[in-house]
Amino acid sequence: MAYNTLTKIGTFGVCQKVGTENFYVSVYVPDKKSMIYRSLHTTILTEATDKVRDLVERGVEGDPIDALAKKPLRTVADVLEFHRPVFEQQASAEFNGIAAGRMTRLMGDNVLQVMVRKDFDGFKNAAMAEGISLSTVARTLTVLRSACKEAVGERRLAVNSVPRIPYYLSKNHVRAAPPKGRPMSPAEIARAIDRLEFLHLLISVVWLANTASRVGAILDATAAQIDVNSV
């Protein structure tokens, strides 16, 4: 079989099979000591070029057959679904599932590569209109950041396709927030613990006191963080 190489993008070539309108990607594979050709499943040059450029931007090397067989991750919904097996195994799986569902519903069709600040502002406003706090919006977007990071690491998403996801709640926002009330003193916490009659409440209060009632800290705590010698 003969192929005409029309252009080179990185280590890959965009080729057309002689006598046909079908386009292929070519690459030299040292292990096989030969040039291999994989169908791009298109007869349109611009589509073929875009597919090969996408391989390069995703960091794909060598035989691209597996990368071509996998569905490209383009939208918010795509990367969240790709990330689902990971976040479902995390301690914060329940929150992650709710967050992914909310993002999929409110901006799932958005193409990552072209998203800008106003797209995220629109999501923030829509989520807060449903009664979600700004801090929950900020935490929700951490799930999308993790999903994009994994997709890039697995060569399913190009680095330059990841949008700049804004941070709506910085440390400065937290410091400037009005106080929720006077912190309890150690003596007050001790008296509250002493008055508890049920073991499950005692365990809950001890957890809350030692993690400052931070949901993430409670869910992500590990046995190594517990000083068993002082219990």
Image: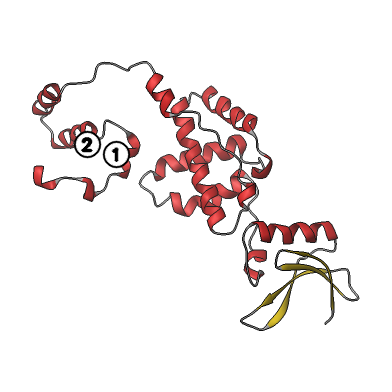
Locate residue 114: give its quadrant: top right
Question: Disc number at residue 218?
Answer: 1
Locate residue 77: give its quadrant: top right
Q: Is residue 1 left or right of residue 29?
A: right
How many circles with numbers are drawn on the protein?
A: 2
Residue 203 screen position, x and y as percent: 17, 37
Q: Is residue 195 left or right of residue 25?
A: left
Query: Which residue position is annotated with label 2?
Result: 207
Report the Cα–Cα distance between label 2 and label 1: 7 Å
Q: Is residue 95 above or below residue 22?
A: above
Residue 85 screen position, x and y as percent: 47, 54
Query: At label 2, which amino acid type do we have?
Result: Trp
Query: At label 1, which amino acid type do we have?
Result: Ile
Q: Residue at image x 33%, y 17%? A: 179
Q: Is residue 60 left or right of residue 215?
A: right
Residue 15 screen position, x and y as percent: 81, 70
Q: Are the residues flagged by discs 2 and 1 in contact, CB closer than 8 Å?
A: yes
Q: Is residue 20 above or below residue 190?
A: below
Give the camera-side residue of 97 and 219.
219
Question: Disc number at residue 62?
Answer: none
Q: Secondary structure at mark 2?
A: helix
Q: Residue at image x 15%, y 45%? A: 227
* Mark toward the start of the polypeptide (2 vs 1): 2
Q: Secondary structure at mark 1?
A: helix
Residue 1 screen position, x and y as percent: 83, 82
Q: Is residue 90 above or below residue 176?
A: below
Locate residue 182: give its quadrant: top left
